[in-house]
Amino acid sequence: MIPALTTPLAGLAVTALLAYLLGAVPFGIVMARLFGLGDLRRIGSGNIGATNVLRTGNRLAAFLTLVLDAGKGAIAVLAARAAFGPDAAQIAGFAAFLGHCFPVYLRLKGGKGVATFLGTLWALWWPLGLAACAVWAAVAGITRYSSLAALVAAVATPLAALAFGRGDLVLVTGLLAALIVSRHHENIARLRGGVETKIGQK
C-alpha cells in the first residue's frame, strides 16, 4: 500500500516545496481579475475554484480556471516523476493539492482542491483520473450538485485504485479524499439542509 521511497529526503523536500508553491497559485482569482469579474472571494460561495467562477456567468473564465487548477497538479506530478521517480510524483501531487487548499499567498485560505485533485490523478495514472472524472460527471449530471459529485468521486478513488490493482496509489488517494471531504464540510451541511447551490446557479 505504500510506494517504495527511492528518492533522497532532500530531493523529496525540494519537490514538496516547489509543488506546494505551484499549487498555491490562485488561478481562480487571477482569472476573475483578468476578466473584470471582481474579487472572487466576495462572489457566490467565496471559493476560489472554477465552480464559483462559473457562478459569475463567465464560462470562459471558469473553463480556464478549471484547466489551470488541474494543470498545476498534473505538472507537479509529471515534473517530479521526470526528475526523481514515482515516489516524488506522489509527494508532489499531494503538496500541490495542499498548496491549492492552503495557499501561502492567500494566508492559507484557499479552495477545495477538486480540479487539482483530478489533474493530479490523471498525471499519477490516467485510468484512475478517467474513472474519477466519469464518476464526477455522472453524479453532477444527475444531481446538478458539484460538491456532491466531488465527494462521491473522491471517496470512490482509493477504492478504484485498489480494485484496479494499484495498491501503491491507495494511500495518497485516500489522503486526498479525506482532505476533500474535510474541505467540503460546509457543503455537506447545505446538502443535508437542501440549500446547496446547483451548477450554473448564480
Image (tube, grey):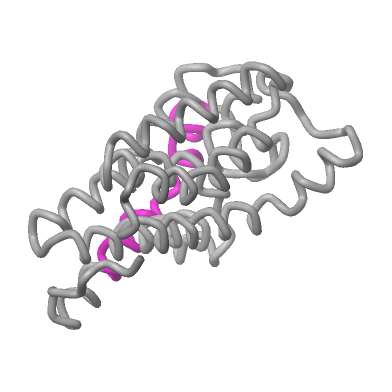
Q: Is residue 40 visible?
A: no
Depth check: give the residue in front, 111 or 83.
83
Relative to 196, does residue 186 appear above or below in the rendering? below
Q: Is residue 123 left or right of residue 149?
A: left
Q: Residue at x 64, y 53 (%)?
A: 181
Residue 100 rendering spot, x and y as whole percentages: 46, 54
| Magenta span of residues | 16-36
Q: Is residue 109 visible?
A: yes
* Residue 108 drawn in magenta: no
What is the quadrant of residue 14 in the picture? bottom left
What is the quadrant of residue 150 in the picture? top right
Residue 9 rendering spot, x and y as whole percentages: 19, 82
Quadrant the C terminus occupies: top right
What residue occupies the far left of the structure in this picture?
83
Relative to 42, does residue 105 appear above or below in the rendering? below
Q: Residue at x 18, y 59 (%)?
A: 86
Residue 89 rendering spot, x and y as whole percentages: 23, 58
Number of marks in picture: 0
What residue occupies the far bottom of the structure in this picture?
9
Residue 164 rendering spot, x and y as whole percentages: 35, 42
Q: Is residue 13 left or right of residue 27?
A: left
Magenta: main secondary structure:
helix
What is the quadrant of residue 52 in the picture? top right
Depth check: give the residue in front, 165 or 104.
165
Q: Residue at x 31, y 51 (%)?
A: 166
Q: Is residue 189 left or right of residue 199?
A: right
Q: Residue at x 41, y 63 (%)?
A: 171
Quadrant the N terminus occupies: bottom left
